[in-house]
Image: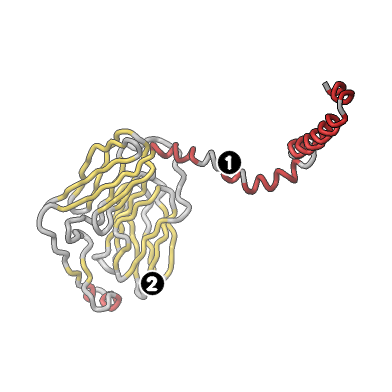
């Protein structure tokens, strides 16, 4: 074909030459990224395009966690709202009353909100799935503030460090009453932090201060991460639990334990508990 065009028509020759020139430019621009300047041309592409392109696998974790749970619920009290007793802190340590600014120190045993939510309830999955659950990177914390333990209920992982803090300008000690772990008794005469841990899983380890007998707390050292503690309105959440059927346990230091069957489907579930006197 090309020989016929050259012999037949000069104009055809000219047009063909133009086509070849433009065709050659198009070929160079198409071949340049793959033959010569591949690394240089690919770098800008890697900064802009791959971000979205390589982000394509990012939905994969979302698909994997689509079967992971957000378990939510509430613990409520049925009946007249219990009155919180007033603690006479000044009898043991006048500094404790000063730390409360003259406000009464109230017991943490029965804390119920105006609309019936129960605080300080620990919830956990009884038959959690087996797995390799890494420990949190941050330590759990129990503080001594205004001659009270904060928080009153501590949920943590077995083997996770526990920072024992004293934020008061008065002496405290923190003494544990475990059945499986090693007992510790730490004196803290001034503000500071000491570190301990519960290497063995254990439920409801009581903590006390011998200087202030009303000061109590409970530590739950769990072998899995599927647990939660109710807030001031009785709400709780537990994340990451795969779809399936489980037993959810609610524990309260005064009103005891309750169990409920929990069915996690499509990544969510709801469970509610009610206590009464």
Q: Residues within 10 Å of mark 1 (few under 14, many from 20)?
A: few
Tell me: 56 left or right of 149: right
Tell me: 110 left or right of 208: left
How is the model colour-coded?
secondary structure
Report the disc number at residue 193: none
Up-down relation of residue 16 to residue 91 (above or below): above
* Residue ID for mark 2: 189
Instruction: Between residue 235 and residue 102, name the one nearer to us.
Output: 235
Quadrant location of the N terminus?
top right
Query: Which quadrant of the view contains residue 21?
Result: top right
**Residue 161 image position (x, y, % from top left):** 44, 54
Q: Is residue 179 visible?
A: no
* Residue ID for mark 1: 53
Tell me: 138 left or right of 180: right
First in sequence: mark 1 vs mark 2: 1
**Residue 156 image position (x, y, % from top left):** 38, 51
Name the residue rendered at 42%, 39% in the picture: 65
Say what secondary structure mark 1 lies in: helix
Among all residues in the image, which is located at the extreme right?
Answer: 7
Up-down relation of residue 256 to residue 190 (above or below): above
Query: Which quadrant of the view contains residue 86?
Result: bottom left
The reply to whether callout 1 and callout 2 are in contact (CB within 8 Å) is no
Say what secondary structure mark 2 lies in: loop
Name the residue rendered at 24%, 65% in the picture: 214
């Amino acid at each position: 074909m090309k020989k016929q065009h050259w012999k037949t028509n000069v104009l055809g020759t000219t047009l063909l030459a133009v086509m070849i020139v433009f065709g050659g430019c198009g070929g160079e621009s198409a071949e340049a990224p793959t033959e010569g300047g591949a690394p240089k041309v690919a770098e800008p592409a890697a900064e802009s395009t791959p971000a979205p392109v390589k982000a394509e696998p990012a939905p994969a974790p979302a698909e994997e966690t689509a079967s992971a749970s957000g378990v939510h619920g509430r613990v409520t009290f049925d009946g007249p709202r219990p009155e919180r007793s007033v603690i006479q802190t000044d009898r043991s340590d006048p500094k404790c009353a000063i730390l409360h600014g003259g406000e009464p120190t109230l017991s943490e045993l029965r804390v119920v909100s105006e609309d019936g939510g129960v605080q300080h309830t620990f919830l956990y999955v009884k038959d959690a799935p087996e797995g390799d659950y890494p420990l949190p990177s941050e330590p759990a914390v129990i503080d001594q503030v205004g001659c009270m333990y904060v928080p009153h209920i501590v949920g943590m992982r077995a083997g996770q460090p526990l920072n024992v803090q004293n934020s008061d300008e008065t002496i405290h000690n923190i003494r544990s009453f475990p059945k499986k772990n090693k007992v510790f008794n730490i004196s803290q005469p001034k503000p500071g932090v000491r570190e301990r841990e519960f290497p063995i899983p254990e439920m409801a380890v009581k903590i006390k201060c011998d200087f202030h007998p009303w000061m109590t707390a409970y530590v739950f050292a769990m072998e899995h991460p599927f647990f939660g503690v109710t807030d001031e309105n009785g709400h709780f959440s537990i994340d990451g639990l795969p779809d399936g059927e489980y037993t959810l346990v609610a524990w309260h230091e005064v009103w005891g334990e309750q169990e409920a069957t929990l069915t996690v489907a499509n990544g969510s579930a709801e469970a509610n508990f009610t206590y009464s006197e």
